[in-house]
Image: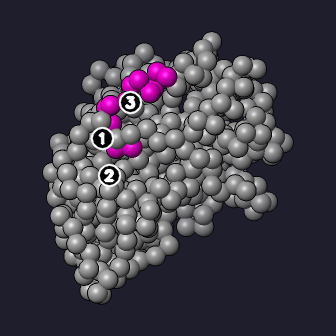
Amino acid sequence: MSSRTVIRGGLVVTASDEMHADVLVENGRVAALAATGTPAAEAFDAERVIDASGKYVIPGGVDGHTHMEMPFGGTYAADTFETGTRAAAWGGTTTIVDFAIQSVGHSQREGLDAWHAKAEGNCAIDYGFHMIVSDVNQETLKEMDLLVEEGVTSFKQFMAYPGVFYSDDGQILRAMQRAAGNGGLIMMHAENGIAIDVLVEQALARGETDPRFHGEVRKALLEAEATHRAIRLAQVAGAPLYVVHVSATEAVAELTRARDEGLPVFGETCPQYLFLSTDNLAEPGFEGAKYVCSTPLRPREHQAALWRGLRTNDLQVVSTDHCPFCFSGQKELGRGDFSKIPNGMPGVENRMDLLHQAVVDGHISRRRWIEIACATPARMFGLYPKKGTIAPGADADIVVYDPHAEQVISAETHHMNVDYSAYEGRRITGRVETVLSRGEPVVTEREYTGRKGHGVYTPRATCQYLN
C-alpha cells in the first residue's frame, strides 16, 4: 500500500475550525494541512490523491459505547467484532470503545482477557475497552488500579438489572472512591432497577405484556432519581461521573444542576432518544420489540430537552449503545412477556449520518456535530488528539463526507448483522463516501476496501476533562 495520500479540495471540519484545505497523510498519520490552492498545498505530492471537492473532510467518528458479541438474556448481540466494526466503518466511525464484562464471582482480568480474545485480529477499525464492574470487592478494587495503568481507564456500573449487573450504593461508592484515587472514570447506567422490577412484576400481573409497557415501567422519574443519586455518590467520593444513555428531560435537569454546581459530571445520549419515541414502542403487533432498549425510548416531548442539552454542553457526547438483536429469534423471546425481550438496538452504522441530519435540520452546527461525535468522546476516553481531530500528528482516521447525497436508511442496504433497521425508510441528507483508518482506505467511494485485523487495540489515557 502507498504510504502517502493527499485529500484535495474539501472543507475540513473539526470541532474547532472549518477551512478549505488539502490534507497530506504519511505513514498512517496526518503530516500537514495547507489552504487549498496555496503553494504549500500544491507542493503536497503522493501516490494516492483523493478528490474531496464539494465534500466535507472530517475526523473519523469515535463511538464510546458499543456492545459487540455481548451475552444478554440467554442470547448474544448479533454483531461480532468483525461485522460490527465493518458496519461502523461504513458509517464513518473509525474507533469504538466496547465493554468488557466482569461476571459476578470472576475477576475483571478474566473479563478483559475474554474480550481481547473476541476482538483481536477481527476488527476493521481501531478499538478500546471499558470494564463493566459487576462484583465489587477488595480484590476487584485493586484490579481497577492495574487496569487504569494499562489503558482501560473507565468502569461501568449498573443501578439497574438486579441479579445480573446491579451494584448497590455501597458498592458504587467504593468503586467511585477507587476511581477518585487512580484517575479512572465511572460510567453509570442510572435507573432504579429495584423499583423498576416491582413495576415490571405488577404490569405483568395485570396482563400488560406488550413491548410498549417496557417504556411505561422504566419511568423517567426513576432514571432521574438514579441520576441524582449517582451524582451525589460521586460528589461524596470526590470522583468524576459519566452518565450513559440519558433519555429523559428530568435526568438532563439533574446533570445540568450538577454542572452548574461545578461538579465533574458528564452525560451521553444516543440517536434513538433524539429521533425515536414511545410511538415506536407502541407499533402494532410485536413490532415495538425492535425498539426495546434501556433506558427506554421516551415520549417525543423529551427530545427537545436532549437537543438543548447538546447545544448547551450539559450533554457532551452522542454514542450509540449499539447492541443489536435480530427481530426473528431474538427479540421474539419476549412475545407475551416484554421483560424477556433482549434490551438493545442497532445503530453503530447510522450515528454520523443521523447527526449530520441534525445539522441539516438546524438542531446543531457542523462543528458541534464533530465535537459530540468525534472530539469529545476522544477526549472523554483518553484518545485525543490521536483520535477525534484532523491535525498534524493525529492518526489519519479521516472521512470524506458528501453533505448533499440523499439516502434512505434500510435493513436492505445496511451492513450491521441484524435483520431490521430502527430507522427503516427514513430519508436523510448526507452520506459517507470514503473512509481512511490510520491512512488505509477502509471504504473507497462507497466500496468496502478494508479487512479484518487492520483495526488494532488502542490503550487509553485517563479522561482529558479532569485536572
Gap between marks 1 and 2, in whole Å?
A: 8 Å
**Callout 3 amino acid:** Ala
Q: Is residue 3 left or right of residue 300?
A: left
Can residue 156 be seen?
A: no
Residue span colored magenta: 113-126
Q: Of the residues shown, which amino acid type is indicated by label 2?
A: Ser
Q: Quadrant of residue 182?
A: top right
> Which residue is at the front of the view, 29 or 224?
29
Is residue 150 left or right of 22 when viewed as pictured?
Answer: right
Q: Which mark is residue 439?
A: none
Q: Toward the viewer: 256 or 10?
A: 10
Residue ID for mark 1: 454
Q: Mark 2 and mark 1 in contact (Cβ < 8 Å)?
A: yes
The residue at which mark 2 appears reads as 437
**Residue 53 pos. (x, y %):** 21, 76
33 vs 318, left or right, is left
Mark toward the start of the polypeptide (3 vs 2): 3
Looking at the image, the residue that sits furthest to the top is 105
Work out whether residue 185 can be spotted. Answer: yes
**Residue 122: in magenta span:** yes
Q: Which mark is residue 119?
A: 3
The type of residue carrying mark 1 is: His
Q: 10 Å neighbourhood of mark 1: few (<14), some, or many (≥20)?
A: some
Residue drawn at x 38%, y 39% is 456
